[in-house]
Image (cartoon, rainbow, N blue to C red):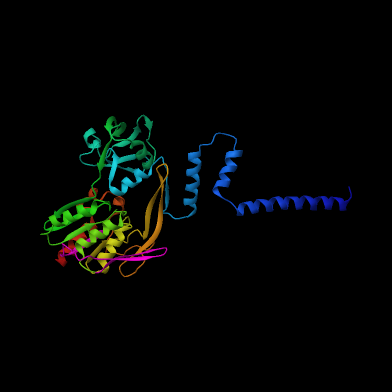
Amino acid sequence: MNKIVKQIIIIAITAVMSSVLTFGYVIANNFSLEYAKNIIKNNFYGEIDMKKLNEGAIEGMVYALNDENTSFISSDYGYDAFAGELTGEFTGIGISIITNEDGRNSVVKVYAETPAETAGLKSGDVILEVDGENMEFSTVNEIANAVRGEVGTGVNIKADRAGEILSFDIKREKIYIPTVFSKTFENIGYIQVTSFDEKTDEKFKESVEELAETDGIIIDLRNNTGGLLDTAINMLDVIINEGTLINTKYNNSEMVYTASGKQIYSKPVVVLVNEYSASASEFFAAAVKENNRGEIVGVNTYGKGSIQTTFKLPGNSGIHLTIGNFYSPKGNKIHKVGVAPSYEVENSEEYLGFDIELIPFEADLQLQKALEVIKIKK
């Protein structure tokens, strides 16, 4: 075969390959999920779980948004369970779990009057098994999913308590996790708010009313990662009489929330925050600070200034989607910036991430500073 013929053949093959590639590119430009699904259904060699295929496609779209606060809620976890987190009501046993340095998971809190307390689980117990399945080095979410179930059904948990292996048979119940805790230091009120759910504003108002005769109130939002926007606004109304509380911006609209004039407490206020105070905690602190209603003590907050809402999909799955951003009363950006304290005080690193109530008073430098500040203001 002479050189010219070889060149013609090579050119012809290249032309054919180019047309194939071009055809593929045209199809890609007209790409649709339904088209891709049909390719898989018609050509995949093996069994196909269509439910998983559909959920995987949605999860892929959500992932492609590249937004850390947008997420897909699979049917395995369930929209209803996710919504329960926002209301504060769960079907479960009533414990909080944290991952230890060794990768195992310990109970950090057993809530009062819950099935876990009745069964005898205690803070510090290391979860080993759930219903016979090894969970020793599982994630917190994996353990939580294993523990969840229908009201009235039972779950068995094996735990390590200082080397002793214990077994607990526990019946799941509908439980409400309290989010507001109050007490006094001499004549200074103290209210810890762990999250902003549907009942938090009501409980907060009750606590403020109970502390009406105090010389001031410390509102502890440390480790509070947020919750419902309306709940936080209702709580601000309790302590702020007038002024802008928050600015919100969406794709095609803006909304400014202002105080309703229903303030019931006008004495000095100090808000405690740390690096885990996020979202609603941040605009709460910003509203107190920028309306000159009180002082902020702690360290710069997390910096989550975006707003999410949750859409339910067929099959009890869902999308938790970012729909806007919120800004401080003066229009300052909070997302990726946070809220700076009036008095910057750090606690020791050994208490980083600790449940606030587990930090000994003498080691809680932030709380001590808040008490000092409020005594000056009273």
Q: Nearer the viewer, residue 184 or 126?
A: 184
Q: Nearer the viewer, residue 72 or 191?
A: 72
Q: Within the magenta stretch, is there residue 265?
A: yes
Residue 272 appears in which quarter of the rendering? bottom left
Q: Quadrant of the C terminus?
A: bottom left
Counting from the top left corner in percent of width and height, residue 25 is at 65, 53
Q: In this image, 363 relative to 306: left or right?
A: left
Residue 146 appears in which quarter of the rendering? top left
| Residue 341 shows up from this direction | no
| Residue 181 shows up from this direction | yes
Q: What residue do we see at 66% from left, 50% from top?
A: 24
Q: What residue do we see at 21% from left, 34% from top?
A: 118
Q: Which residues are magenta?
A: 243-272
Counting from the top left corner in percent of width and height, residue 109 is at 26, 43
Q: Within the magenta stretch, is there residue 60?
A: no
Q: In this image, 28 relative to 150: left or right?
A: right
